[in-house]
Image: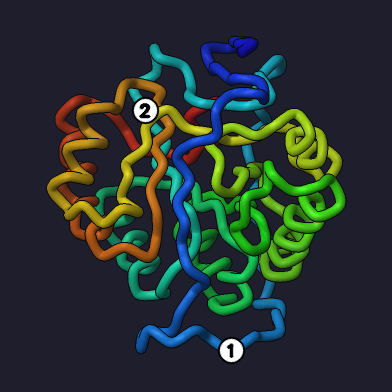
Amino acid sequence: MLRAAASGALATVAGAPLVGCDDERPAASPSGRPTAKVSVRPAPVGRVPALPPLPAGLPVQIEHGPRARKAVALTFHGRGAAETATGCLAEVERAGARVTVLAVGDWLDAEPQLARRVLDGGHELGNHTMRHLDICAMDAKAAYAEIVQCADRLRRLTGGVGRWFRPSKARLATERVVRLARRAGYPHVLSYDVDSLDFTDPGAAAVRSTVLNGVRPGSVVSLHFGHAGTVAALPAILDGLHRRGLRAVTTSELLT
């Protein structure tokens, strides 16, 4: 596995084991029943916040940011009941933090208002494929469709496709998926170096322990909407980061 580092950020190029992405079900209503297929209607598009330019020479697949920087990026897989998504956002905002949300396209179909909710909270919104399938096992045509269909939802709802793409059911993308993501407008693939394992529903205490035991300056942490334990764990996680002098920022802020 070839590793390249630039500006303190590290990435691993494809071909590595595929781990760390969960097997979530399609977004459901609060009653637990699958939502009906919804046509995506553009929300009122305000001015999409300008993102700071990234430093030159960043690697293609980013696992973490500069280790000398007293900051971390909490990243959320965007899927699941709206209540858990808004609960997570409320907790991070209460702590003055900002996060990165990688949205699944069928979740945006079911909960289109949450795209603007993320941006209006000062957070960053990106692409986590259309249906959250094993994108690295797909042929090129199917994999590209997964990326661009989600990008289309993001563009229609927010006016832009977002900066970050994260492959579904894989921590690292294959070379083919990296190439397809670049073709779709994503020059960097966002991975992570801390997997909270919150999608296994181990309970809030376990999620807190896993994150705080693994996090370091510059870490990118993988978390998920859709799990009550994640919402419950966030206050202690954010307090633990604060006690260590670590700020929770967006991925773009972490890298710039």
Q: Could you tell whether 104 is left or right of 236 in the image?
A: right
Q: Going 63% across and 76% down the picture, which residue do you hit?
A: 109
State the mark number for residue 17. none
Q: How is the image coloured?
A: rainbow
- Point out residue 223 in the picture as x, y percentages from the top left corner: 38, 48
The three-letter code of the residue at mark 2 reads Ala
Question: Element under label 1?
Answer: loop
Pair 1/2: label in front: 1
First in sequence: mark 1 vs mark 2: 1
Work out how far the residue at label 1 is from the one at label 2, CA to CA, in angstroms: 40 Å
Q: In the drawing, what numbered circle is on residue 36?
A: 1
How packed mark 1 is, by other alpha carbons closer than 10 Å (few <14, some 14-19, many 20 or more), is: few
Q: Residue at x 53, y 86 (%)?
A: 35
Amino acid carrying mark 1 in the image: Ala
Q: Quadrant of residue 225?
A: bottom left
> Whole-percent x and y of residue 160?
73, 56
Quarter of the image that includes the N terminus:
top right
Would you place residue 114 above or below residue 237 in this image? Answer: below
Q: Quadrant of the C terminus?
A: top right
**In the image, what residue occupies the spot 57% across and 53% down?**
125
- Residue 63, given in percent of the width and then of the height, sits at 51, 26
173 or 160: nearer the viewer? 173
Q: Position of residue 47 (x, y in %)?
A: 68, 61
Residue 71 circle label: 2
Tell me if residue 122 can be seen: no
Crowd tier of the residue under label 2, counting other residues whose Cα lies within 10 Å: few below 14, some 14–19, many 20 or above: many
Residue 84, compared with residue 55, is above or below; it is below
